[in-house]
Image (cartoon, rainbow, N blue to C red):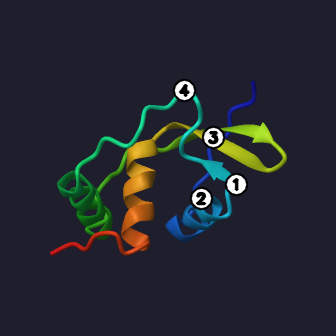
Amino acid sequence: MIIKETTNKIKSVYADIKDGELDLRPDFQRGEVWTTKKKKLLIDSILREWYIPPIHTVSVGNGRAEVLDGQQRLTAIRDFLDNQFQID
């Protein structure tokens, strides 16, 4: 297994999610469990440029990847950018 660290902008990760290149719900992942309040807190932390733990993915071939760790955070980011909730 080859492990490499990359830094991606939110815009790029969001595009990968929307294009189906990044799977937020592989078979081994639980469903979405974060409340809207928790999602808002994450977005607030990002906007304040506070530390957010890294997201871990694994390549599954054909330019696709699956989320190993960070599903709830990525779901919150996707939902915010899709205007499913707003922060105060």
**Left or right of 75, for residue 18:** right
Residue 28: mark? 4
**Marks 3/1: CA distance?**
8 Å
Q: Return the x and y of residue 8 as percentages of the image width and height.
A: 58, 60
Circle nearer the N terminus (4, 1): 1
**Residue 44 is drawn in which quadrant?**
bottom left
Q: Quadrant of the C terminus?
A: bottom left
**Of 75 and 47, the residue lying toward us:** 75
Pointer 1: what residue? 21
Q: Where is residue 26 drawn, in percent x and y?
A: 59, 36
**Is there CB contact under 8 Å for labels 4 and 1?**
no
* Above/below status of 31 relative to 44: above
Identify which residue is drawn at 74% across, 47% down. Answer: 64
* Location of residue 42 in the rendering, given as x and y in whole percent from the top left corner: 28, 56
User: Which SS class for mark 1?
Assistant: loop
Identified by mark 3, the residue type is: Glu
Q: CA distance from mark 1 to mark 2?
A: 6 Å
Q: Nearer the viewer, residue 32 or 22?
A: 32
Near mark 4 (Cα within 10 A), the count class, few <14, some 14-19 or many ≥20, is few
- The answer for how far apart the CA atoms under marks 2 and 3 are is 10 Å
What secondary structure is found at the residue carrying circle 3? strand
State how far apart marks 4 and 1 are (Cα).
Answer: 17 Å
Q: What residue type is disc 1 on?
A: Glu
Disc 3 marks which residue?
A: 66
Q: Nearer the viewer, mark 3 or mark 4?
A: 4
- Give the image location of residue 73, x and y in percent: 39, 50
Packing grade of label 2 (10 A; few <14, some 14-19, many >=20) is some
Tell me whether the residue at label 3 lies in contact with that at label 1, contact meaning CB atoms closer than 8 angstroms: no
Would you name the residue on which mark 2 appears? 17
Q: Residue furthest right?
A: 62
User: What secondary structure is found at the residue carrying circle 4?
Assistant: loop
